[in-house]
Image (cartoon, rainbow, N blue to C red):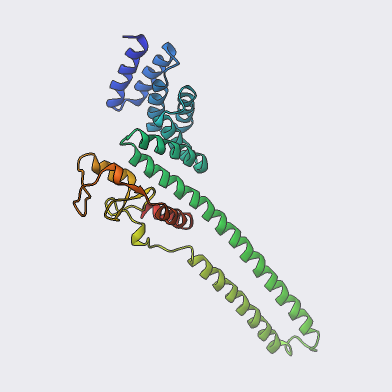
Amino acid sequence: MQPAEVHREAGNALFSQEDYEGAIKEYTRAIIQDNSNPAYFTNRALCRLKLKRYGEALEDAQKALELNDRLMKAHFYKGQSLLELDRPNESLRSLTIAYRIALDQKSPSSSSICQNIMQAKKRQWEVREHRRIEKEAAVMHEMTDILRNECRRKLMEAQENYATYEDFADEREAIEFEYQEKINLLEEIFKRADERFRVREVPDYLIDPISFNIFYDPVIGKSGQSFERSVILEHLKTHQFDPFTREHLSVNDLIPNIALRAACEKFLEDNGWAVDY
């Protein structure tokens, strides 16, 4: 056995014991012996992910991809690292590549990758939602200031028509009431607009009937029933039938549900919270 492989096996043994620091040392020794094997880098990347050392995990995943850009694990670990580093757009690109490779390889990791994709989409939504709230708050503040300044201007103009401040009391009260009503209406309009973004129910047709999660990559079976691709593929590994009709079903019978996928993407774009529904 090559020296590098000796260190890899030692690292694997330590990893199985959850000794991630020890495993990293062994994988590093393997890399020193042979830095052309991408598996050594992906193994070390996984250890660093476990230890939440996301920047280092990203470097290892990237190095593995430089050696082999078709490595599903490297794209997966890169996507996970980027997500934890709060770079959801880059994360989604890497995870999507990993998902496609996993499907091609019939890898059981496709389901885990899919879950990470949904989390990346959720984070994208959170960023957009934060920006939206900040912008709306700024607009609300600006418009409220305009109304208050207009109220002060009108009060000053009206007061000039009265000899004393006491004589001006009734009109002052009427003007202040008018503008407070406008501010209240403005706040109500913004509140209603905000509630439009706070839908908290997912339509049934967007939910996978097996996992009860919102669809990411739906496919249609012979019966017309839609399933999440990774979930039904896992089912078909041991049961060659439709889980509801019990009719024979194979991988070749599955057809991408493009319309449903588009509907899910649109719903998640506006309601990123639904990832955890």
Q: Looking at the image, is 186 positioned above or below residue 104? A: below
State the residue at coordinates (41%, 34%). 76
Q: Is residue 13 left or right of residue 165?
A: left
**Residue 96 in the image: x percent, y percent?**
44, 40
**Residue 67 in the image: x percent, y percent?**
47, 22
Q: Quadrant of the C terminus?
A: bottom left
Q: Is residue 169 left or right of residue 234?
A: right
Q: Nearer the viewer, residue 137 or 113?
A: 113
Q: Quadrant of residue 34?
A: top left
State the residue at coordinates (70%, 70%). 146
Q: Looking at the image, is 213 positioned above or below residue 108? A: below
Q: Looking at the image, is 239 positioned above or below residue 152? A: above
Q: Quadrant of the N terminus?
A: top left
Q: Nearer the viewer, residue 186 or 97?
A: 97
**Residue 89 in the image: x percent, y percent?**
52, 43
Q: Quadrant of residue 38?
A: top left
Q: How many marks?
A: 0
**Residue 171 in the image: x percent, y percent?**
70, 87
State the residue at coordinates (20%, 54%). 245
Q: Quadrant of residue 20?
A: top left
Q: Looking at the image, is 267 positioned above or below residue 78? A: below
